[in-house]
Amino acid sequence: MIYGALTHPQLLRALAAAGHGSKILLADANYPHTTGVNPRCELVSLNFAPGMLDVIQITEVLKQVCPIEKAEIMVPAPDAEQVEIPIHDEFKALLPDTEFAELSRFDFYDAARSEDVGIIIATGEQRLYGNLLLTVGVRQPGE
């Protein structure tokens, strides 16, 4: 269910196998890339170096090749210090027509371990709470 150009063969294959309702986790550099997802999830490593590639850069490409229906972002647990998270504003600006949901840290981990998550993209994102869980939408006729 992809459209447009993307050159990463492993990611292209994984996206082509994803269907409506499948989820893609763009995980920051601190995320447990192998234990924080279900065992069937395909790991695509794009964490070239600290800060490279970041979640924003990868999302810019993904939104051109894959319909995105929903986005979920990680926020601090209710009993943790509540902090401002600037990257979340960037996510929302990048995906202005997408529904966003906030999940506390441990609820986000549970969602990321769901059987619906088929792809985890390890990024070099260094900003705190820089994880983004995307739900694949429906490709429209003519796209």
Image (cartoon, rainbow, N blue to C red):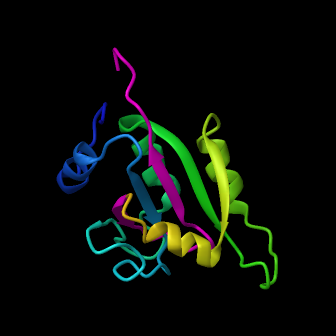
Is 63 left, or right, of 43 in this rendering? right
Between 91 and 98, the residue placed more toward the observer is 98
Picture quadrant where residue 23 is located: bottom left
Residue, x 62% and y 51% (percent of image)? 91
Between 111 and 14, the residue placed more toward the observer is 111
Query: Split into 4 quadrants, where in the image is the C terminus?
Result: top left
Q: Is residue 121 magenta?
A: yes
How far from the left and from the top, in percent, is residue 136? 42, 43
How far from the left and from the top, in percent, is residue 24? 40, 56
The furthest residue to the front: 115
Between 43 and 64, the residue placed more toward the observer is 43
How far from the left and from the top, in percent, is residue 31? 48, 78
Is 89 left, or right, of 56 in this rendering? right
How far from the left and from the top, in percent, is residue 45? 30, 68
Decide if residue 104 is in sight here: yes
Q: Which residues are magenta?
A: 117-143
Is 71 left, or right, of 20 in this rendering? right
Picture quadrant where residue 50 is located: bottom left
Q: Is residue 107 magenta?
A: no
Residue, x 29% and y 66% (percent of image)? 41
Between 7 and 33, the residue placed more toward the observer is 33
